[in-house]
Image (spheres, rainbow, N blue to C red):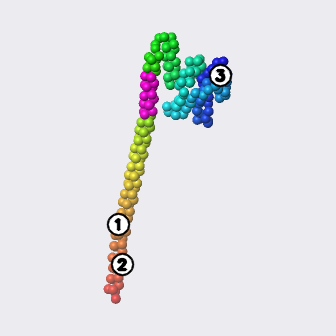
Amino acid sequence: MAVKIRLARRGRKKQAIYDVVIADARAPRDGRFIEKIGIYNPNTNPATINIDNEKAFQWVMNGAQPTDTVKAMLSYRGVLLRKHLQIGVIKGAITQEEADKKYQAWLEGKESQISGKVEQLAKAKDDAKKAKLEAEAKVNAARAEAIAARKAEAEAANAPAAEEEATEEVEAPVAEEAPAAEEKKED
């Protein structure tokens, strides 16, 4: 019986989440499996990979063959490096302590690399948000200037009309007084 470590799809349309399962090679993709060892979510950035490294290592050492995608994930998580080091220990090329030290050093480096990427993505997101707010502030300032210019134009247009009305009002009483004065002279 050929045993594979592969992905089983679940989740809704265009929002797939995969289970990392140990299954018989003849079983259908989403069908019967022997054991579930983890979850893979490609929808996040960076992709979320939660695999039980101990179980995966045990299955790989017992001969389970990972698919290409799962092989990349196991390599990313260090399971294949651990297998490589363990084979070296079995053959007598290195000791178990040396293998453990190399594996722990690799894990620490990988964790710092992953956290650095997460921080970099968060910083890029914050920078994009700040740039968007600054652009929005510039647009708002331009709109405020345009509104102020329109108000100034409206006031400037209303000011000569108000002056003309004021001069017409001043001239109108003078014109009315003159005929009244003429009437008095005629009497």
Residue that badge 3 annotates: 24
Quadrant placement of the C terminus:
bottom left
The residue tagged with tag 3: helix, strand or loop? strand
Residue that badge 2 annotates: 176
User: How many numbered badges does the structure rendering display?
Assistant: 3
Q: Amino acid at mark 3?
A: Asp
- The label number, if any, that marks residue 74 in the structure image: none
User: Quadrant location of residue 66?
Assistant: top right
Does 176 sit above or below residue 160? below
Residue drawn at 39 percent across, 46 percent down: 138
Question: In the orientation shown, which residue stands out farthest toward the top?
Answer: 92
Q: N-terminal of the two: label 3 or label 1?
A: 3
Measuring from the top left, give residue 143's x and y in whole percent: 41, 50
Q: Is residue 49 visible?
A: yes
Q: Nearer the viewer, residue 50 or 139?
A: 50
Q: Amino acid at mark 2?
A: Glu
Asked whether 99 falls inside the magenta stretch, the response is no
Q: N-terminal of the two: label 2 or label 1?
A: 1
Determine the CA span between mark 2 and mark 1: 20 Å
Q: Amino acid at mark 1?
A: Glu
User: Quadrant location of residue 111?
Assistant: top left
Does 66 sit above or below residue 162? above
Residue that badge 1 annotates: 163
User: Quadrant location of residue 181?
Assistant: bottom left
Give the magenta part as a residue range: 104-120
Q: Nearer the viewer, mark 3 or mark 1?
A: 3
Determine the CA span between mark 2 and mark 3: 112 Å
